[in-house]
């Protein structure tokens, strides 16, 4: 089960990231639909319970070029539901990603947290695992592809987040 750790620095405080950026509708719409070019990104559930927010998101990222063996497995649709829980006190978001295809064979877990990094700066740390239960070599290829896509998306989201924070004067 390959694990990943992705870290980026934002030009805002942890408080700003969690209260004015992470769950902000405009931020998420611009990030996922405009910057990352998802064909679908919508909140299905947003249950705010004070210190916790339970959120379910439906998403469909662009697939891009896939090697032949992966294309036959994934097809033309890589949509998923992200079922997450934000713990405001811990400044941590944990989520399970449930693909719309092969959900019994693909297991993705993500945890996002932040740490302060000076005045009006924080580091977002995304950790997780991707486990694909398929015959060799398809499972390993799909795991590598998914982690590579996550790394690219998180890098693009880091750039966008800093642009958004600057544009909205949230730093």
Image (cartoon, helix red, strand yellow):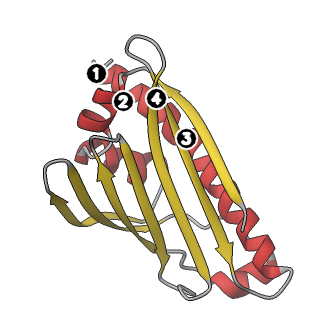
Q: Which label sits in the foreground, 1 or 4?
A: 4
Question: Which residue is denoted by mark 2 in the rendering?
Answer: 164
Q: CA distance from mark 3 to mark 1?
A: 19 Å
Which residue is pictured at 48% across the width and 53% down the height? Answer: 111
Which residue is pictured at 80% across the width and 83% down the height? Answer: 69
Question: Which residue is denoted by mark 4 in the rendering?
Answer: 115
Looking at the picture, does residue 22 appear above or below residue 109? above
Q: CA distance from mark 3 to mark 4?
A: 20 Å
Q: Are marks 2 and 1 in contact (CB under 8 Å)?
A: yes
Which residue is pictured at 45% across the width and 68% down the height? Answer: 96
- Quadrant in the picture for residue 129: bottom right
Question: Which residue is denoted by mark 3 in the rendering?
Answer: 156
- Quadrant in the picture for residue 137: bottom right
The quarter of the rendered structure image containing the C terminus is top left
Q: Would residue 65 be visible to someone looking at this image?
A: no
Q: CA distance from mark 2 to mark 1?
A: 8 Å
């Amino acid at each position: 089960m390959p694990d990943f750790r992705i870290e980026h620095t934002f030009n805002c405080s942890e408080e700003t990231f969690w209260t004015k950026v992470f769950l902000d509708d405009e931020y998420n719409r611009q990030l996922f639909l405009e910057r990352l070019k998802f064909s679908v990104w919508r909140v299905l559930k947003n249950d705010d319970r004070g210190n916790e927010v339970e959120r379910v998101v439906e998403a469909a990222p662009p697939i891009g070029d896939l090697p032949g063996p992966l294309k036959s497995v994934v097809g033309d649709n890589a949509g998923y539901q992200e079922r997450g829980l934000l713990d405001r006190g811990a400044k941590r978001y944990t989520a399970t990603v449930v693909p719309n295809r092969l959900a019994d064979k693909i297991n993705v877990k993500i945890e996002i947290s932040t740490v302060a990094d000076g005045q009006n700066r924080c580091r977002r740390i995304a950790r997780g695992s991707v486990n694909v239960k398929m015959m060799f070599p398809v499972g390993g290829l799909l795991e590598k592809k998914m982690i590579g896509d996550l790394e690219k998306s998180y890098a693009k989201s880091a750039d966008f987040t800093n642009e958004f924070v600057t544009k909205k004067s949230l730093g």
